[in-house]
Image (spheres, coloured by chain):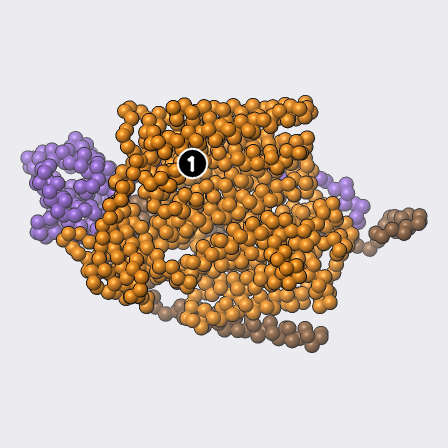
Chain colours: A brown, B orange, C purple
Amino acid sequence: MSAQVARSRAAWLALALIAIVALAVGVSRTGGARTPEERIDAVARTIRCPVCPAESVYESRNSVALNVKAEIARLIRSGQTDDQIRAGLAARYGDDVLLVPSTRGIDALVWVLPVALLVACVAGLVVAFRRWRRASDVGPPTEADRALVARALRPDSGSDP
Amino acid sequence: MNGALGMAGIALGLAASVLGGVTLVVGLAKHRLRLVRSGTVYVWLVLAGAVLAVIAMERALITRDFSLSYVAEVGSSRTPALYNVASLWSALDGSILLWTIILALYLAATLLWFRRRLSDPLVTWALVVLFAISTFFFLLLAGPANPFGAVSGAIPLDGPGPNPLLQNHPLMVIHPPMLYLGYVGFSVPFAFAIGGLITGRVGEGWLLDTRRWTLFAWGFLSAGIVLGAWWSYEVLGWGGVWGWDPVENASLLPWLTGTAFIHSVLVQERRGMLRVWNLSLLAATFCLTILGTFLTRSGVIESVHAFSDGPIGVYLLMFFALAAGTSIGLIGWRGDRLRSPGSIDSPLSREGAFLANNVLFALFAFVVLLGTVFPLVVEALQDRRLSVGRPFFDRMTTPLGLALLTLMAIAPVLPWRKASAELLRHRLFWPACLGVACVVVPVLLGADGLAPLLAFGLGGFAAGSALRQLVLATRRQGWRGLVGRANGGMVVHVGVIIIAVALAAQTSYQRSGEFRLSPGETATFGGHRFTLLDQVREDTPAAVVLKARIRIDDGPVHAPARQQFKGRGDIVATPSVRTGLAEDVYLTLLKPSTEDDARVTFGVRLMPLSLWLWTGGALMAVGTVLAAFPGRRRRPTDPASAPIMSRPADEVAARQDEAEADLVAVPRLGGADV
Amino acid sequence: MSEVLDPPPPAAAEAPRRPARPARAIAIGVAVLVALFIVIAAAVKGGVKETAETPLLGLPAPVVQTTTIDGSPFDLASRRGSWVVLNFFSTWCRPCVEEHPELVRFAAAEAARPEGAELYSVIFNDDTDKVESFFADRGGAWPKLTDPDGQVQVAFGVAKSPETWIIDPAGVVRARMISTVTDESLTELLDGLRSGLVPGS
């Protein structure tokens, strides 16, 4: 291993260290208890506005959405957990106010299928690369190969391969 | 008069599409070139029909001919001229008309471009496919989406005007045509793909023919999507640019598969592999544009942008079935014979990276499609409603986006065939430094959260990689180092990276607050001071506008507004945005003052890096044009790994292999590729 | 898998291998999926579906503590012992305005009978002034309940007006009707509930 390679390895190591430290510092800042306002926003983002499709109550300015958001704030003040609030709203407005599909029953498919496809794609690529590698190293030359080469060499073969 | 003119145009277009298609098929079947040549005359008749219909509709809109139901629906004497012209595409029927004229233009352009090659059955079949598509759209115009229907009952004296959201920002004038130029543009490569499957010629010939068409369609679609996001930001007032709404997803799906194609087509050009896969991607892209149109125009899926529901859904679904059935059938029939025997030596190579790119884009498209149609599936199976919303899409696409950024960092420096770890260490060093800097600086400035920091770091890494290629190429070739596919592509990469970073920042760091002030009072939020000056009322011909004048940081005055449109009575809130390099201050008027209560309620959102989104979009557009600009390229007859002297000028990376050969030992294989 | 694990066969043996047809197999698979999807898309009607189902049916009604439009306090729990009909109402919703005469008739008929149901209007996202003048113009002397912050509507999960709910003397939710009602349909349902014939709609 040349000195150049060693230097480059050391530089990469230093880069990786700096990156990890910076990420760790950044991530550690997110810890700690969330403020009630943050919780209200977080829950509101996962609840669909009951009258406006595909918009959350966090985004919507509809009066019904504002009322639901006020209810979320009340429930958070009264000490309910985020999941309890979501379950309560779903019980009243129907399950389709939840913007995040559940992981139970058939709903879980929406989470599982993409992962399954990823696994299938990676497996397919692994198999393909193995096959390609096998195709490229053909093993030791056989008698037939030698004969072929010998035949090809017999006439004046001045041209480049 | 206008109605008759328009119907005549539609009838002409329909007849010409059918006759053109039939003539060409007969000419192909009987091998009569003269018949084929005469069939192309119908292309001009199709165009004439579409132009006539559009002129008739514009004339009706401009002269306010309320005897047409479409004009009575979207026209109004109060609409300003610009939006009046644009109201051609402000409702369902008109948007189909826009689609049709763009298709007719593409059909004519295809004929012009390939006029010297009409004897080639591939070109003829492609024209047949385009005729078939235009037949369908003219049928829609003649039947379920006829914009020239007469109004029932007495002719109204005035109409409500277009949807207010579509008439208060100039972006709405250019966003839909851009988007449609993209959607419809994919018809041309699709037609060639089908032609290639029918004639059995899926060698590299048709690819070279249509690559630039694909690129243009992709560029228009990208521009259309970014403009749509910008419009939603400037007009809708919810402060976002992307909501994972079905209509938005419908435009993203063909973009994702189209992007996958643009990358994997390079593997086919270079190595002759992935032929069937590339055909499938093109077919999927086209089918997804039709599927998206079906999903958003038929009312099966609820959407914020609900366009309309009507009888058109069934037709679009049937056409989707036809397009998908034909493509899948042809691929199943021909696919195995057309596969090429090539192989990829190493996953750590340019072609390996393109494969990974395709896997990621295919997955991305699958996630978006699944999330969009999953509620339909559950409803059909269990008669139960559920929503798949933004949190799902955010959660699923964040890792995919980060993986794509990683790939964008590594792939551009990879040589074809095989790379070594040492080569990567050498070439990626400065990009990695930039990436680390892009984590460290935000952290020093107080940024937090894993996903956004990773996005910044990987974005910097990827941008470094793209810039490295551009710098090396311009150093070597001067201004030519910016044009051509590889270099223009790197400019596009930089644009995409900027957008990705901005989206990550917006998702994580956006803050919002709500204030209720009397005139003269001041509130502070996020380091800004907001002073409510007063509320003013303006009467425009189309609407009554209430504006709250708010001074930001003792500087400029901004006036978020509420417009009550006179025709429809709809109330639309128009935000006012103070644009900044690092952060936009986004004001919305939530509750105007009344006679009893002088207080005004307004919302403030601090949106980081919004400007970056539009900048990134502009860079993508510039990069697409640069990429389409012909660089000095390899003659197509040259073998892919021909000696260095004939290496293409735009394949800079390939030449860098040589330039850096003294630094690293890269196995360089000669011989036949394919 | 065995294919991969086997030692690589000599090159000559590769040629006559059973022709694999992956493209055809995959095409058939995709075709099946697309066909399924088309069937589903054609079957689903779409649009907003309104069901009168509510998980609250058969359960004690949510707490309703508010004031009437003229300021006197109202507590739903204190109405135990009589049938209560809650009508969510706003002046800006056309179906609400359309059904109003029916409610006037219904209220008069119930008031006339012994142990008749009590009708209350819950103001749904509307100004009290407007509601007051509406009732002054069009009649209807029953109490109008204010709903600041929409607490009552959220408690019942009401997204759109009009909606009509029936609560029995035990304070249990017995029926929910979405969109307009008529005097006849409301009376019929209420009579059914009273006689115990209808277990709940």
Identify the residue at image location x=51%, y=65%: B457
Instruction: Name the image quarter holding residue B58.
Output: top left
- What subunit carries mark 1? B
Q: Nearer the viewer, residue B219 or B378?
A: B219
Name the element at disc 1: helix
Left or right position of B13 against A135: left
Q: Is residue C42 above or below residue B644?
A: above
Q: Nearer the viewer, residue B74 or A25?
A: B74
Q: Is residue B346 above or below residue B148?
A: below
Q: Amino acid at mark 1?
A: Ser
Instruction: Name the image quarter holding residue B132.
Output: top right
Identify the residue at image location x=59%, y=24%: B22
**Residue B222 x, y percent position in the rendering:** 50, 48
Left or right position of C81 against C151: left
**Residue B309 x, y percent position in the rendering:** 38, 34
- Answer whether residue B207 is visible to the viewer in this image: yes
**Residue A71 x, y percent position in the rendering:** 25, 55
Q: Nearer the viewer, residue B49 or B399?
A: B49
Q: Which residue is mark 1?
A: B95
Identify the residue at image location x=39%, y=49%: B231
Quadrant including the N terminus of chain B: top left
Label 1 neighbour load within 10 Å: few <14, some 14-19, many 20+: many
**Residue B356 x, y percent position in the rendering:** 60, 54
Q: Is residue B143 above or below residue B510?
A: above
- Answer whether residue B360 is visible to the viewer in this image: no
Q: Nearer the viewer, residue C61 or B37?
A: B37
